[in-house]
Amino acid sequence: MHRTTCVIFIMMFSLSAPMMNAQPDNIGKLTLKSAVEIAIKSNPELEVLRKEITARESVKLQSSLYPNPVFDIEAENILGQEDFSGFKGSEVTAKVSQDILLAGKISKRTKIAEADISLAEWDYEIKRLDVITNVRKVFVSALSTQTIIEKNKELINISNELISNLEKRVEAGKISPAEVSRAMIILNSLQIELNRLQSEYDISIVELKSLLYQPEFSFTSLEDSTESVFELPDFNSLVLQLGNNPNLKRYEREYQKQQAVINYEESKAVPDINISAGYKRLNEAKANTFLIGASIPLPLFDRNQGSIQEAMIRYDQKKIEKESIENKLRLNLGVLYKRFKSLLNISEQLKNNSIPKAHEIFNIIKEGNQSGRFAILDVIDAERTLFELQNQYLTVIGEIQIVKSEIEGLISKEIN
């Protein structure tokens, strides 16, 4: 069976690793690699496509079989009157006939079945790549939110400590209770944002479990790298790699199948021969004879013209289909590339400019608070601004990872 496609995708997409032998019901930290492995193993649509490959192998077997011979027995001149009463004047004929398929019909229809197997394998690879891409996108989104939640909890803990110190200063009569109230308002807004993020995270986890087809599967947290050094590949190099996309690669076999169909339909224009041989018993003459025969249809009207013409049209149709898919993939790649480039610029601006400046301002205000130049609320506000920028940076990194996964899904290759 044609297995080249499986080898290609194992080499091109490292996340499509061998599936796990056992699947735990409860683990500590779930990694992206483990999530992909579980999804590939559990996805029922992939299992259906695996069965489809096996079914088409059976079709190939059937297409390679020769037609069965036909045994025919016939009795004439029986149960009549006078000389033909009973079996006195009967003639009994027994013969075997066989259709002889000409013009290589069997080998040509077998090639069609082989192409169908290959196409089923490509359908499997298309779905598998789709599963991997979707799992990666949801996993990265949930992981990014998880990291932001941890940052926000850290900020809330720090804010609670500051408020506790403010309350002590209020009790000592050093500041007004209004200072505590204003700080509590800021803390409440942080808590509301944390609740929103937690809800977003819970939804992502439910979506992730649905992709894993494991609704009862539990884990304590997600674990993987949320930040990497990204280098933007050249757009033209990515366009060239679009040819690796299984939606396009499958057309190599699609063309082969359609050509095989054309060849098969053309072979059907050649009529098949039916040959027969048998034995004949003449009871009246008490003699035995043998007979042979051959028959062939005369292709005067039906030379399979319509089916041949249809097969040629289907071949041209597949070319148009491929061009359409190629244009869509290229357009999608262009949109993702621009999005990727924009997000990279934003992340660099946040990392190299906004966050360092916010950190510097926070340190200045914090030191100024100790000398009485800034209020504690200024410290809390500056700290909140710093954390918000850090959260924004983490969000952008998560979006970069998602867009990166989508681009990798298009080119069927990881971007290093």
Image (spheres, grey):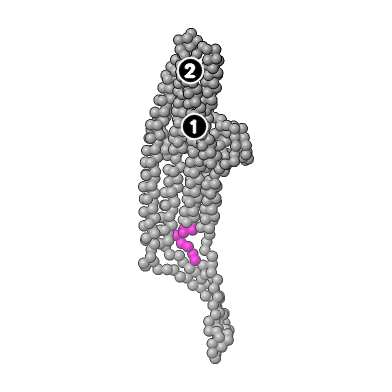
Up-down relation of residue 9 to residue 283 (above or below): above
Q: Specify the farthest residue to the top.
A: 371
Q: Which residues are magenta?
A: 99-106
Name above or below for residue 376 compared with residue 3.
above
Q: Please indicate, yes or no, whether residue 359 appears anywhere in the rendered image.
A: no
Q: Who comes first in sequence, dot 2 or dot 1?
A: 2
Percent from the top left, x then y, of residue 160?
A: 54, 21
| Side of 221 where 332 appears, left or right | left
Q: Which mark is residue 196?
A: 1
Whether residue 23 appears in this view of the structure is yes
The vertical placement of 146 against 113, above or below, is: above
363 and 261: which one is in front?
A: 363
Mark in the foreground, 2 or 1: 2
* Towards the viewer: 247 or 229: 229
Amino acid on which the number 1 mark rests in the picture: Arg
Tell me the element at label 2: helix
* Of the pair 75 and 223, the residue shown nearer to us: 223
Residue 179 circle label: 2
Q: Quick check: is 105 in the magenta stretch?
A: yes
The quadrant in which residue 272 appears is: bottom left
